[in-house]
Amino acid sequence: MGLKTKGNSIFKVIGASSLGTLIEWYDFYIFGSLATIIGAKLFPADAGASALINTLAIFAAGFIVRPFGALVFGRLGDLIGRKYTFLLTLVLMGGSTFLIGLIPSYSTIGYAAPILVLILRLIQGLALGGEYGGAATYVAEHAAPGRRGFFTSWIQTTATGGLFLSLGIIVVTKNLIGAEDFAAWGWRVPFLLSILLVGVSIYIRMKMHESPMFSKLKSEGKVSKNPLKESFSHKTNFKMVLLALFGATMGQGVIWYTGQFYAQSFLENTCKVDFNDSRYILLWGIAFATPFFVVFGSWSDRVGRKWIMLCGMLLGIVFYRPVYQIFLDDTDMTKTEQKDILQVSDPVVSRLAVENTKDSLVTTSATVTLLNGGSYTKVQSYTKYDEPGRGVVAGPDVYKDKKLPAPVFWKFVGLIFFQILLVTMVYGPIAAFLVELFPTKIRYTSMSLPYHVGNGVFGGLVPFIATLIVSFPGSTPLSGLWYPIGIAALSFVIGAVYLSNTKPDHGEGHEELTKETLS
């Protein structure tokens, strides 16, 4: 059904809102997708693993400030309108992303580099905190009440679509200019390109009209005078904010970021899968799973939102560890036998003098090609001591740049697809769920806060906290999964006990569009 609302068809509304939101997610996620390379540019060359952890901390900082952006821009959205508020967030996000692409590296300006990037990430986080609530509210307030799950689910596809776009542009850029140039300067290209996408989106959004529900409130003089106070000092409304956070968005957030971001980080940094292979796996998984956002959003219009979201959480709780164990087992090259090897390249030897000594660190690397079509680079290192009697001390063998044989590659695509399918279950219905919890005049503020705390804090911290947990003594590569599993389990219990599965047209805050509003 196509609705006409003061010159906005529902499909134009979805298109304008989705394009802008997709670009904002793209801007936000290229940083996380390039964390390993960016870490090498922002911190000293000898920082080692701490460079990645520090870069993930900067990435996480953008998530932590999202709730503050939700409060600032949610208030603006409830005071002056949805349209102009998320125009402002788009400009802030796009400008910050473009500037990250221009910041010099650590070798040029020292620690000013990570500080400047941190500031821009904070601006990005604030902007994203205002964007999602505005876009979801804008679409929901144009949609007929019985179709809110279906229509808002198109907005939900943009988060995964933005990740897909960021991965795609990164892979294309790297393949066009080569791995060496990409690591040196090409990583900046995806950041700089975003300014063109933002310009197109701003042009489209400028042509859209305000949401009919907000326009009606404004014409009747019923716009909230203090959205923050009405959202959080009113006992019933604040109770709904807390319930939305702990019973839904908190669990949804960790499922989202585990299934997509932590999965990529795990494949690349823990399993040492080849750069392109790890991204192609994610791209295929996203491509196959993305339509299910709309499937589950539409289904929630018929059966309610609650149990679809909670089932997605429960499946993650049960299957995350088995899935990630398969990732580990199938990339364990220490089990390679001589009969499985087709060819070994001539080793490349490098020697690095140990500072203030006559000792040297010797490293050899060779590419091993397997009969099944896979390959990897085996790196062996040892320290050659100058002192008599100390001799040579070998370090552990390192297996990296693993190219997977076709059957394993597609198995991994299936496992990523499964994880993103869980994302679609928890994320597809949630915009409609949040919109329907709160009344129109404080909806932007009320729904934005629990969404961005759940996603920005609990969800956005998954890559950082999980990576940090794994770095602790005595931990295993799977130890980091206890964080998303624990948060999802808590959210599942709270949601199962306290959330209602009220049919979409009869819950609190469901102002139906009248014929006069739609004319």
Image (cartoon, rainbow, N blue to C red):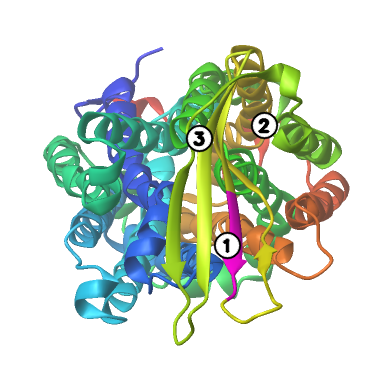
Q: Is residue 78 visible?
A: no
Q: Say what secondary structure mark 2 lies in.
A: helix
Magenta stretch secondary structure, dominant:
strand
* Magenta segment: 380-385
Q: Estimate the x, y position of residue 51 in percent, counting from the top left.
A: 47, 68
Q: Mark 3: few, some, or many residues within 10 Å (few <14, many ≥20)?
A: many
Tag 2 residue: 419
Tell whether position 4 is magenta: no
Looking at marks 2 and 1 on the same chain, the residue that comes earlier in the sequence is marked by 2
Q: Say what secondary structure mark 1 lies in.
A: helix
- Camera-nearest label, 2 or 1: 2
Q: Is residue 130 visible?
A: yes
Along the line of sight, the residue nearer the viewer: 50 or 507: 50
For residue 274, the mark is 3
Along the line of sight, the residue nearer the viewer: 291 or 307: 291
**Side (left or right) of 477 relative to 343:** right
